[in-house]
Amino acid sequence: MNNTQKVSVELKNGRFRLLNMAKADDLNPKAMILCATAQCAGFTVMGLLQKNNVTPKTFEITIEGTLDTEKLQANSRFRSFVINYNVECRSLNDQQFVSQAIYDAQERECGLVALLKSAAPVSYDISIVSTDKIE
């Protein structure tokens, strides 16, 4: 019954871009809000990681927002949000820094995540892998 809007961005050359060469111009206004939030969260995490000289190998953020209408309408409102962080680290040691940076961005550092929280509940999932060889 509810309509879910979904946007994914990935870190490419120091910027968060929509997946599959998509363009922001192609997004509806509700999806643009999600895109801006994903980018803001990503830049916030990266800023926190820079303080510890950590650069992830790959970083993708997907955000979903469930609307209160079956079809997208101008008066549709978000009822909930889920943000998924998928990160590939260069070392096992980086995983702790990445996890803490995502937590800090979600809970107090990212202004757009805070804005979404004022509109509806926001939950998040973190998936972190490392490319370290285990011997």
Image: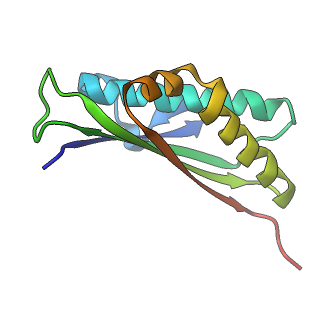
Which sits in the foreground, 56 or 117? 117
Q: Is residue 101 left or right of residue 79?
A: right
Q: Position of residue 59 (x, y in %)?
A: 61, 45
Which sits in the foreground, 69 or 127? 69
Which sits in the foreground, 8 or 125? 125
Residue sitting at x 52%, y 47%: 124
Q: Is residue 22 left or right of residue 96?
A: left
- Image coloring type: rainbow
Residue 15 shows in this picture: no
Residue 96 shows in this picture: yes
Q: Quadrant of residue 8?
A: top left
Residue sitting at x 72%, y 48%: 99
Q: Position of residue 129 (x, y in %)?
A: 68, 61
Residue sitting at x 13%, y 37%: 69
Q: Is residue 27 left or right of residue 10?
A: left
Residue sitting at x 82%, y 60%: 92
Q: Position of residue 20 (x, y in %)?
A: 39, 44
